Image (tube, rainbow, N blue to C red):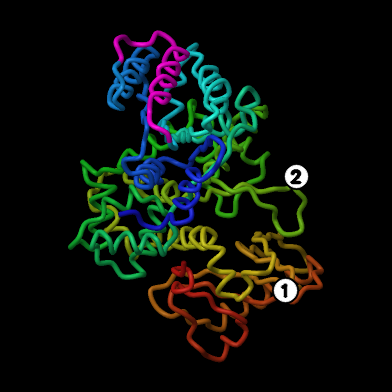
Amino acid sequence: MIIGREKEQQRLLELLEKEESQFCVVYGRRRVGKTFLIRETFVNRFAFQHTGLANASKNDQLAQFKESLRAAGMIVRRKPKTWYEAFSLLQEHLASLPAGKKVVFIDELSWLDTPKSNFISALEHFWNGWATARSEKDIVLIVCGSATSWLINNIVKNHGGLHNRLTMKIHLQPFTLNECRQYARHMRVDLSDIDILEAYMIMGGIPYYWSFLRQGESLSQNIDRIFFHNDAPLRDEYDALYASLFKNAAPHIAIISALATKKAGMLRDEILLASRLTDNTVFTRTLAELEQCNFIRRYKAFGKKEKGSLYQLMDNFTLFHFGFVANNPNGDEHFWSHSVDTTRHSVWAGLAFERTCLWHLPQMLNALGISGIISSAHSWLTKSTEDHPGVQIDMLIDRNDNVINLCEMKFCDSDYTLDKDEDAKLRTRKAVFKAVTRTRKTVHQTLVTTYGLIRNAYSGNIQSVITMDDLFRP
C-alpha cells in the first residue's frame, strides 16, 4: 500500500497516455520513497528495469546490466563491453516486444556513470538517436536516484545532448504531518498527535525513517531504539545520507555544520568564515545543491534585497543529529529518554517546531484563510539601538492583501498561557517592527502552537491562533 503521493502517481500514469515517447526523472533526498513510488505505480508493467551498483566498476555495471536484460526475457550471449553496446542490446529487446507503451526504469542512474565510461553520451544516443526517432513513439524512460545533485546537474540541467529532452520531472518531497500520521496508522503504531508531531520534529517526513517505529513502544522507547542503541538502524545515517547524495560531501557537511550553530540562518559571507571554505564556484554550487535537496533554504530577511539572502538549515533529521546523536559522549542507549524535560530538549523542541511550521506553510496559510492570496515567509532582525531594543522575528508572513502576520511559535504539551511579561515582549516586538520597517501594512500577531491559547486578560492581543490540528490538515 502506498501512502499519499496521489498527485505524483497521477503524473506518472499520464506518461502512458502521451502520444510522444516520454523521458521522466524522479529525484529527491535519500530514503524519501522514489523507487517505491515508481514500482508501486507501474506494478508488473516494466518492459525493462535496472538498478545501478554502488561503488562498482564499469565492467561490473555492464555485467549487471546484462543480467537485467536476461531478467526482462532477452537472450544475451555475451556481456557488452561499452554502454553503447549495452543500450544497443536494450534497443533490440524493446523493439522485439508487442505493440504498446514500453516502460523502462533505471534506478540509481548516477552509479552507472563511472569515470571514463561515456555513460551519459550513450544514454543521449539511446534517447535522441533511437527512442524519440521510433515511429511508434512508445518508449517511456523513467530514471531516478539518491544522488540528487548528480541528477540535477547531468539530467535536469544537462547542456549537451539531453538539453531540454526531459518531458517530466518530479521532485519527490518528504511526507507531511498528515501523511506521517496515515503511515503510522497503517503500521498500527499507536501514537498521539503530539507524539507524531515530535517524531516529525526528529525524523522529518522521511518514510524510511518512520518505518522503524514499532507497535507497543512509546515514542521515547522508539527513538532510543532507532537512534541510540548499539545496533540502532539510524545511528550512522547522517554520514551515509550526505555521502550518498554528493560525490564529495566534505564541503556540504562543512556548510551544514556551520548552519547548525545559527537558529535564524547565516549570510553567505558568514558561512564562508564559519566553514573555512573558499569563495569560488564550488562553494556556490554546493550551496545550490543543498538548497535543491531541501537541506537548507535561502530566503530574504524582510525588507532586504537578494544579495542579503540568508541560508537556514531546514532538515529536521540533521538538526536532531547535531542536537542529540552527535552529543551523546557516553554512548547512553537511553539518551533520548534521559533528555526529555531537560533544557537541551526544550531548546531543540522550539527550533524543530519552527522548522516543522515552515515545512507546513501551506497549512498555515489555509488556517489563516489566505491560501488564495499571494504570500511569502520571511524572518526579521534588528539590533538594539538608543531608540529601541533588539528584536528577532523568526517567521513573518507578508501578504498581498496589505497584512503582515508576525508569527510566534510555541511547542507546548498543553494550551498556551500568555502572561504579562510575554504580552509585553510581543507588543514591543510589534512596535519596533512597525517603527523600523515603516510598513504601512496592518500587522497582526499570530500564535502557532500545539493545542491552543487560553483566554485571559492578555490573549486579546493575539489576532489569530494556528494549532497542531491545522498543521495536520492535508
Picture coordinates of residue 55 (x, y %)? 37, 21
> Residue most toward the bottom?
457
Q: Nearer the viewer, residue 394 or 249?
A: 249
Q: Does residue 53 lie above or below 416 as drawn?
A: above
Is-magenta flag for residue 388?
no
Picture coordinates of residue 29 (x, y %)? 45, 42
Q: Which residues are drawn in magenta?
A: 76-99
Neighbour class for label 2 at 10 Å: few (<14), some, many (≥20)?
few
* Helix, strand or loop at mark 1: strand
Q: Does residue 139 lie above or below 219 as drawn?
A: above
Picture coordinates of residue 250 (x, y %)? 49, 29
Q: Is residue 221 left or right of residue 343?
A: left
Q: Which residue is mark 2?
A: 307
Q: Amino acid at mark 1?
A: Val
Q: Which residue is mark 1?
A: 403
Q: Nearer the viewer, residue 272 or 220?
A: 220
* Helix, strand or loop at mark 2: helix
Q: Which residue is found at the position 47% from the left and 51% from the top?
A: 8
Asked if one can make out residue 253 in the rendered structure from this viewpoint, the answer is: no
